[in-house]
Image (cartoon, rainbow, N blue to C red):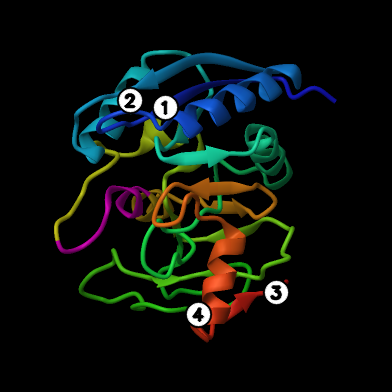
Amino acid sequence: MPIKKEVSIAIPCAQVVEPKTLQSMMTLTASAIKNGITIIDIGITERAMIDDARNTLTETFLKTKTEWLFWMDSDMVFSPDTLIKLFETAEKKDAKLVTGIYYQRKGMNYPCLWSRGEELDNGDITGMGSPKSKTNKYVGTFIFPYKEKQEPFQVHAAGFGCVLVHRSVLEVMPRPWFQFLKGQCSEDFYFFVNAAELGFKVWADPRINLWHLGDAPMIGKEEFWQKALKENIEVNSIKK
């Protein structure tokens, strides 16, 4: 059945949108429109700090009546069905925040998913990194989804390169929505921690294929797991 949703797209950009990103955006929007999703607007910022860029795009979005805002990063490659699957999960889980799963551009290419050291509805999740601290709530451990996992699951925070946000989250959240705290956290972690304190849960959809333009031509699920195997990295994966 067609997905009867209206959505705006936001792309914070420091310099230029990568050509591969633009190409995937075109196929993504074409597939979304074909499946009944209406793209209301595409907002792009240039030459701005990332938190300022995201706040500017949010301000612009809230001046409209559009229900959903889809965040894309300018160095990501998206599968054509990305928006379709995000909306399917939002409907299935009655969710206001849904993220795809992508991997860091550099280093060990860990998944950009975190637990704050608290129990999630999925069960206790542990990974690599620092657990939640009483002195700094903006820290967490990386979450490693099982490679073949297909069911959406909850996380505490994620990167903001592929996130679907309902306007109700932005309307009730105190400004600024995004803030980079030097020595503490990135602007996306800041957003998700504050959203959680307002009662919003974050759902991650492992069915979506995403790639991050980085050290290798593109970093995706396969590249991460190949490196983990090569480096003998032990990870605690979500298997449910």
Question: Mark 1, residues whose alpha carbon is within 10 Å: few (<14), some, or many (≥20)?
Answer: many
How many residues crowd around disc 3 within 10 Å: few (fewer than 14), some, or many (20 or more)? few
Residue 87 picture quarter = top right
The amino acid sitting under disc 4 is Thr
Q: CA distance from mark 1 to mark 4?
A: 32 Å
User: Mark 1–mark 4 contact, CB under 8 Å?
Assistant: no
Q: Is residue 7 above or below residue 142?
A: above
Q: CA distance from mark 2 to mark 3?
A: 36 Å
**Residue 34 placement, left or right of 137:** right
Instruction: Report the residue marked by disc 1.
Output: 10
Residue located beneath label 4 in the image? 126
**Looking at the image, which is closer to me, 10 or 170?**
10
Q: Position of residue 53 (x, y in %)?
A: 26, 31
Q: Is tag 1's residue or tag 4's residue first in the polypeptide sequence?
A: 1
Residue placed farthest to the right in the image? 1
Q: Front-most of 210 and 178?
A: 210
Q: Amino acid at mark 1?
A: Ala
Q: Determine the CA span between mark 2 and mark 4.
A: 34 Å
Sooner in the amino-acid sequence: mark 2 or mark 3: 2
> Which quadrant: the C terminus?
bottom right
Q: Quote the CA–CA distance across marks 4 and 3.
A: 12 Å
Magenta highlight on residue 234: no
Q: Find residue 239 and name its label.
A: 3
Residue bearing the label numbered 2 = 57
Mark 4: secondary structure: loop
Disc 1/disc 3 C-alpha distance (Å)? 32 Å
Residue 70 shows in the view: no
Contact between marks 1 and 2 (CB within 8 A): the answer is yes
| Element marked by disc 3 | loop
